[in-house]
Amino acid sequence: MRYPNGKKYVANKEEVSSKKEHRTLLSAANRGMSLEEDINLSNEYYRDNQIALIHKRPTPINIVKVDYSKGARITDAYFEKQSTTDYNGVYKGKYIDFEAKNTKSNSAFPLSNISEHQIVHLKNVLYHGGIAFFIISFQMKDEIYLLDASFVIDFYEHGSRKSIPYEVFKKEGVLIRQDYSPRLHYIEAVDALYFK
Amino acid sequence: MRYPNGKKYVANKEEVSSKKEHRTLLSAANRGMSLEEDINLSNEYYRDNQIALIHKRPTPINIVKVDYSKGARITDAYFEKQSTTDYNGVYKGKYIDFEAKNTKSNSAFPLSNISEHQIVHLKNVLYHGGIAFFIISFQMKDEIYLLDASFVIDFYEHGSRKSIPYEVFKKEGVLIRQDYSPRLHYIEAVDALYFK
């Protein structure tokens, strides 16, 4: 945990000898890293640098049995379905809420792993004036897009196919710049879409 | 889970024969109810009636062992300290973040059960333009106050005693109206303090 003004060491641009070398280091560093880890690290960067305050919601767990003889050790529990999204927080006073997903498809993002509860939740966020979006990683293309939740809601409810074509991301979404620190400059994309 | 426009049955004012009788029913119904349960029920009411979208954050749990033979049953895990607050969400487009605590004291709210992590978190919320407060229940008085987080931060960092006198709540806080549904009209207090 860092204090509001405690800044973490961040590599200066000049310290990175060339963009190409930087890229190569990046790809190596990213190997095996998940989208979730990238977002968590980016959120840490945004928090440490006082840019935005976004946290991952803990996974809801239903606790069945706790052994107090071992200092409150949970001995039986199970995972509950997340009825909201994975991330929320505050940026420039506004409420921010989003879900992040990977896809191995090159042509479309399948909606099968978005739950109806999440759609309802995101509709509510928009209704209350919050900012709601998806961060979708097209892994094979190494492209990550930010797309406003309204498109996802619309395709979920009215789309003939249960997926969102890649072209919709190209046209309506914002390509997120990948880097070393933060891994994902997704706040740049938020600025471009919501704070123009 | 209810849909954005799906309203839940809420007792009409006329259906409650008298304020006094209402109060009596209330006290009986409240017996054994905790502040947390009251807030959770109020949040459900606010969600169902499209007034605000506030959720309790799940308790963070560190999972040590999962038995997949039993369908992902957690067999060893322990509680982690909450580094943020218990509640957050969106109201009128603004980010809302708060912590709720009980006290049996009549004279002051002791700061001993507020962690430094929570103070740091709330400072960050204020820095980013969010709304941050505490809901403090003086159980013996049956009075629940909403107090802006800045007072708590100030007493935590500069107070000579590690507590906030009851008078501060009386003077600077807003008394939350207790009712049947919602249990706590804390959004009224939010309106009075932040949306005048």
Image (tube, coloured by chain):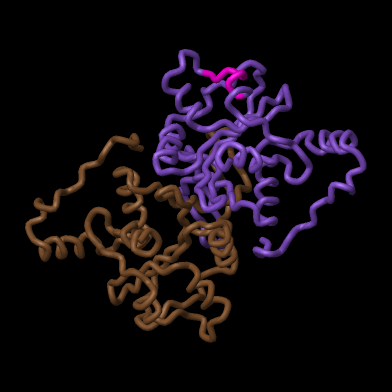
Chain colours: A brown, B purple
Q: Is residue A30 above or below residue B41?
A: below
Q: Nearer the viewer, residue A114 or B88?
A: B88
Q: Position of residue B122 (x, y in %)?
A: 45, 36
Task: Describe residue A10's horizontal placement relative to residue A129 as left or right.
Answer: left
Question: Which residue is at the front of the view, B132 or A24?
Answer: B132
Q: Is residue A50 magenta?
A: no
Residue at left offset 51%, top offset 38%: B132
**In the image, what residue occupies the spot 39% across and 75% down?**
A172
Q: Quadrant of residue A173?
A: bottom left
| Residue A74 pos. (x, y %) | 55, 43
Please say if A75 is above or below A78. above
Query: Where is residue A10 drawn, in percent x and y?
Result: 20, 46
Q: Residue furthest left?
A: A17
A175 on left or right of B52: left
Q: Which residues are magenta?
A: B163-169
Q: Is residue A175 left or right of residue B99?
A: left
